[in-house]
Image: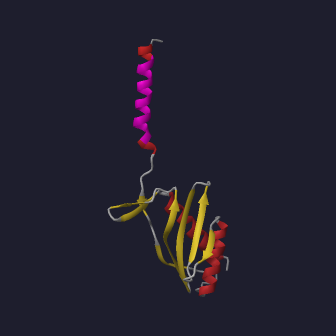
Amino acid sequence: MSSKSLASLLLALASCTFIAGPAHARSLVPIVNQSDVAVVTSSGKAPGKEQVKQIIMTGAAARGWTVAEQADGKLLATVMVRGKHSISVLMDYAPGKYSLAYHNSMGMNYDQQGGQPVIHPKYNTWVQNLQEAIRAAALKR
């Protein structure tokens, strides 16, 4: 193969890599916070504040989240994924309900676009998984 042919081949490969590269990047999505999510137990009764806290902690632990109590009475739930992605949500809770909001992240491409916070789409998926685990823990009571 001549050096001219080799150079053409390398240029073509580099062009394909450059063109295909952005197609693999994920678009950032708006952060979805949750307010006043109902906590429903198997009995149908709304649990008290302390019970809601225990349900959150049980559900979070089931999905690999760690939960720390904050001085203001809120909970900070954090999950580390594959050792390189981390997200934290701040959770407020009351009898029969809880709310959660983005707190912090690492390796999730958090940004502001048009004044709105955006992030890697897996953030919302992981938060939905947390909510599902909390729902499952509540139904076991």
Outermost residue, top side = 2
Please determine whether, in this image, residue 81 is positioned above or below residue 99: above
Q: Residue at x 44, y 21 (%)?
A: 9
Q: Quadrant of residue 55?
A: bottom right
Pick the residue in front: 22 or 124: 22
Please determine whether, in this image, residue 113 is positioned above or below residue 37: above
Q: How many marks?
A: 0
Please determine whether, in this image, residue 79 is positioned above or below residue 137: above
Magenta run includes residue 12: yes
Q: Residue at x 42, y 32 (%)?
A: 16
Residue 41 visible in the shown view: no
Q: Quadrant of residue 111?
A: bottom left
Image location of residue 128, percent across then percent down: 53, 66
Q: Residue at x 42, y 20 (%)?
A: 7
Horizontal side of 79 relative to 118 (left or right) equals right
Quadrant for the C terminus, please: bottom right
Outermost residue, front side = 71
Image location of residue 47, percent across then percent down: 60, 85
Outermost residue, left side = 114
- Assign the magenta stretch its main secondary structure: helix
Magenta run includes residue 39: no
Image location of residue 140, percent across then percent down: 67, 76
Image location of residue 84, percent across then percent down: 58, 54
Pick the residue in front: 43 or 103: 103
Q: Residue at x 58, y 80 (%)?
A: 40
Horizontal side of 128 relative to 9 (left or right) equals right
Looking at the rendering, the stretch of residues picked out in magenta corresponds to 6-21
Residue 13 visible in the shown view: yes
